[in-house]
């Protein structure tokens, strides 16, 4: 498809992902207009549009300013009382064409971190905002554990090779917790070392992939014996299903 996806770092640990084909570009979750403008100008690109995953300010704060800077900007996002500046509102399973890019993406509803949260995917790439992180998942600000668990389970149905473009560089901190949960998961330990090496060279640990996340991310592994045993030891009682395990894991991490 010849589309390049580049991270634009913003704030402390956000990535605003930029999709590029020839000189046309789209960005995902532009919390900061200035970082996007600098990148677009430096690479002599034309910004055609914006994808938004949810209402938090570090994902939406740059929208209005970008609309002033770039004429005819398409801004796609979910129905939400807390997002202003959208030109197109989308919902679950809707297909969208990104003007200027040879690319069609599908919308997936991902309630949990917030109630308005959506993601965008095709067979090669997933933009999942603050729902799935490498080695972790978003906090529950608005939804229930059941909602976030089901949202994450939907993402595990994507093809293994799908690249996972999360919005934050939280990977190493997430993996320190993941190793507490699964100290004997060798693939996790190997992945942790790779990520530590990348950060030591100031490289992003992202994108990850669905295959890697299914192997190392405890929030996708609540059905595994290793995670179940660890959770029951930590919470001191038995947990009867994957949703209660997921809820216990989320609250363990929140308080770790
Ligand atoms: Zn958020």
Image (cartoon, rainbow, N blue to C red):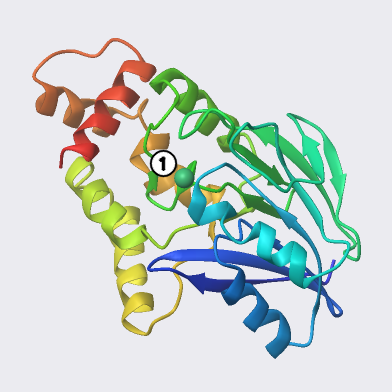
Image: 80 above or below 21? above
Q: Is residue 140 left or right of residue 25?
A: left
**Neighbours of disc 1 within 10 Å: few (<14), some (14-19), many (20+):** some
Which quadrant is home to the N terminus? Answer: bottom right
Residue 155 x, y percent position in the rendering: 58, 37
| Residue shown at the point (68%, 58%) measured from the top left | 64
| Residue shown at the point (23%, 43%) measured from the top left | 182
Kindly identify which residue carries mark 1.
138
The residue lying furthest to the top in this view is 240
Of 130 and 78, the residue lying toward us: 78
Residue 59 x, y percent position in the rendering: 55, 53
Image: 241 above or below 17? above
| Residue shown at the point (43%, 27%) measured from the top left | 142
Using the rendered view, name the quadrant where residue 11 is placed.
Answer: bottom left
Q: Is residue 63 left or right of residue 86?
A: left
Q: Is residue 139 left or right of residue 231?
A: right
Of 245 and 16, the residue lying toward us: 16
| Residue shown at the point (85%, 80%) measured from the top left | 23
Q: Is residue 26 visible?
A: no
Q: Tag 1, which secondary structure?
A: loop
Say whether mark 1 is within 8 Å of ligand 1: yes
Image: 84 above or below 69? above
Of 200 and 64, the residue lying toward us: 64
Residue 185 x, y percent position in the rendering: 28, 48
Using the rendered view, name the quadrant where residue 217 is placed.
Answer: top left
Which quadrant is home to the C terminus? Answer: top left
Residue 34 x, y percent position in the rendering: 59, 75
Q: Is residue 129 visible?
A: yes
Image: 105 above or below 107? below
Q: Is residue 204 left or right of residue 120?
A: left
């Amino acid at each position: 498809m010849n589309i390049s996806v580049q991270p634009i770092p913003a704030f402390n640990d956000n990535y605003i992902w930029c999709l590029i084909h020839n000189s046309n570009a789209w960005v995902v979750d532009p919390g900061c207009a200035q970082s996007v403008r600098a990148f677009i100008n430096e690479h002599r690109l034309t910004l055609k549009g914006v994808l938004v995953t949810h209402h938090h300010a570090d994902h939406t704060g740059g929208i209005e300013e970008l609309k002033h800077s770039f004429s005819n900007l398409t801004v796609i996002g979910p129905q939400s009382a807390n997002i202003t500046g959208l030109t197109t509102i989308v919902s679950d399973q809707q297909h969208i064409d990104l003007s200027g890019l040879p690319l069609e993406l599908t919308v997936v509803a991902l309630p949990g971190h917030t109630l308005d949260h959506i993601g965008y995917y095709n067979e090669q790439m997933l933009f999942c905002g603050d729902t799935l992180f490498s080695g972790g998942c978003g906090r529950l600000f608005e939804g229930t554990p059941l909602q976030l668990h089901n949202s994450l389970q939907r993402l595990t149905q994507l093809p293994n090779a799908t690249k996972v473009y999360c919005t934050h560089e939280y990977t190493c901190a997430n993996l320190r917790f993941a190793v507490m949960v699964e100290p004997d998961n060798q693939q996790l330990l190997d992945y942790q070392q790779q990520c530590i090496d990348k950060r030591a060279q100031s490289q992003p640990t992202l994108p990850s992939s669905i295959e890697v996340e299914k192997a190392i991310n405890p929030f996708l592994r609540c059905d595994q014996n290793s995670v179940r045993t660890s959770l029951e030891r930590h919470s001191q009682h038995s947990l009867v299903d994957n949703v209660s395990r997921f809820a216990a894991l989320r609250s363990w991490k929140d308080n770790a």
